[in-house]
Image (tube, coloured by chain):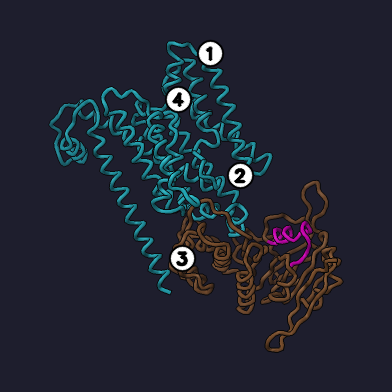
Amino acid sequence: MLKVDNLRFAYPNGRDILTDVSFTLPRGEVLCLLGPNGTGKTTLLRCLLGLNRSKGGQIRWEEQAIDKLSSRKRARVMAYVPQSSALTFPYEVCEVVMMGRVPHLTYGSAPGYADKQCALEVLCLLGIESMANKLFQRLSGGEKQLVLIARALAQQADLLVLDEPTASLDFSNQVRTLKLIRRLADQGYTVLMTTHSPDQAFLAATRVLMLQNGVVFADGSPDAVITSENLSSLYDTPAVIAESIIVGGRTVKVCVPVID
Amino acid sequence: MHIFRSAKSEGKSNFALRLILLYAVLIVCLFLSFLVGRFPISPYTVLELFLSKLGIVTPHWESTLETVVFSVRLPRILLAIMVGGSLSVSGASYQTLFKNPMVSPDILGVSAGAGFGAALAMLHSAGWLEIQLTALVFGLIAVVLAYGISYIFARQEITIMVLAGVVVSSLFSALLSIVKTLADTTNALPSITFWLMGSLGRSSNDNVMVMLPALIFSMLLLFLFRYQINTLAAGEDEAKTMGVNVLLVKTIVVLSSTLMTVIAVSICGIIGWVGLVVPHIARMLVGANYPKLILTSFGIGGIFLLIIDNIVRGVPGMELPLGVLTALVGTPVFAVLLSRVRKGWA
């Protein structure tokens, strides 16, 4: 379980970006972080990942204080999938995925058979083993996203942190990524992702955390938290939740902004 | 399942084969280089000379021959390989660290600092050893200054580090210009000018004994951290989330590259282009993965500078300094590389 208590962050000589953020995320759940631009979503992710040093509060994973861990140990607890990765030089996909094995290497040692086996398994899990020897730069946005997820999975960390995983993807790749996230959660991964589209929270998340001006605005299940009142107030834009029944009697909810 | 494994192992044997070929070429070049020079020596004699050192053949030749091979040609050949190799490895390391294909080993001001140091010593008509020492000291001062500036103001933020290097380089270039204007035009100024164009002409076995340990130490450090350095190609933040101690790894890269470059420069003056161009040729051969890249860059850099220096030594009437020739050869090579660049540096 991920447990964040009274997390506070501010840039030096600046106002607080995060004030007193607390939430918990049990194993195997998918938490979707919602909030307008500049509200501190990315800052929260960076604090979790150890890229920003928090001003106060605690981050614990299974009762272990994460902010006290070395970056190497932390990398074995949580893995990060960036929105995009700009590799300047021509790396092959398998070389990019092997980077995810670095937290398991000691200085001086090269990845061994077990590391290669792990990278291979991850590529097969995502169905992209045929890309292994392609150049990362030549891939499409959707393929790159899969490779970055593969790299994170190669770290063998239980907690995955994804920064807007669907932001630059087309419709079908968005759906593929969301399905993959659900599949990973079913396999026991704990996922924390940010998104700008509340609809995706209905599709993939089991939990939603709404963040406004650095404080928790709402926290709970998607159905309980994503309401027209909450959305309208969070984004300062009138919106309604539309429900419709699709094949198989399943109810689908979508968020529709109100344009007058 | 086996698609990946076979592709992977094929890629690996392919790399091993290329590396063996590359170093075989290097060894052949090394041997042939003994034949180059004003004093004609047959390949058979060179072999005999080396065998005599092992006690297999008893010497039956004049001692001048031994002096030419062991005190003149051997150090020069070894230094050409070591200097070319270390400049290329430094270049490859900095390019990976800074995620920038246009970076060369003197990005933090080593060359400018060493140039100023050497010129300062020549202004006071110092001996060769003093010149090398002052070059070394000022090369180090320049890097410490650039690194210090970026550390104090931005905790080594990459862009700031590059900018600090540019600033420090300009400072030492300005100081060098002052020294040049003060230098007398018959002795000091020409020697400063020639030093700045680079030469292996004064190579000695003492130089080899300084360069070799520095090279081994630096290469060992880079090799130990090769997989950690590799992740920096994905950017500092991502490297950190992959468990890399970025501050430590960056320091390792700067330390080893500086050590190799500063000694190379203080021994043979400023040799441009090698550290910029060779890593790109290496990437075309084996890809960008850093562990492969350093071994390949060293071999190519060694061969490249050895051949160029052989041209300087062997072509009669060739008065072009080493640094000029590397630039003359480097420019067309770079032009060809640019034409091959499509998406990224493949």
Taking A127 as reference, is A168 above or below it? above
Spatial distance from mark 3 to mark 2, Cα to Cα? 30 Å
Which chain does the numbered disc 1 sit on? B
Q: Which residues are magenta?
A: A33-48
Label whose residue precedes the other's in the sequence (1 or 2): 2
Percent x, y of residue B145 = 60, 33
Percent x, y of residue B302 = 36, 40
Which chain does the numbered disc 3 sit on? A
**Same-chain check, marks 4 and 2:** yes
Spatial distance from mark 4 to mark 2, Cα to Cα? 28 Å
* Residues under numbered marks 3 and 4 in contact, where contact means CB atoms less than 8 Å apart: no
Would you call the spot at circle 1 few (<14 residues within 10 Å), some (14-19), or many (20 or more)? few
Residue under numbered circle 3: A132
Q: Amino acid at mark 2?
A: Ile
Q: Amino acid at mark 3?
A: Ala
Checking the image for residue B182, the label placed there is: 1
Q: Quadrant of residue A159?
A: bottom right
Q: Quadrant of residue A184?
A: bottom right
Of badges 3 and 2, the one in the foreground is 3
SS for dot 2? helix
Checking the image for residue B158, the label placed there is: 2
Is residue B340 located in the magenta-colored stretch of the structure?
no
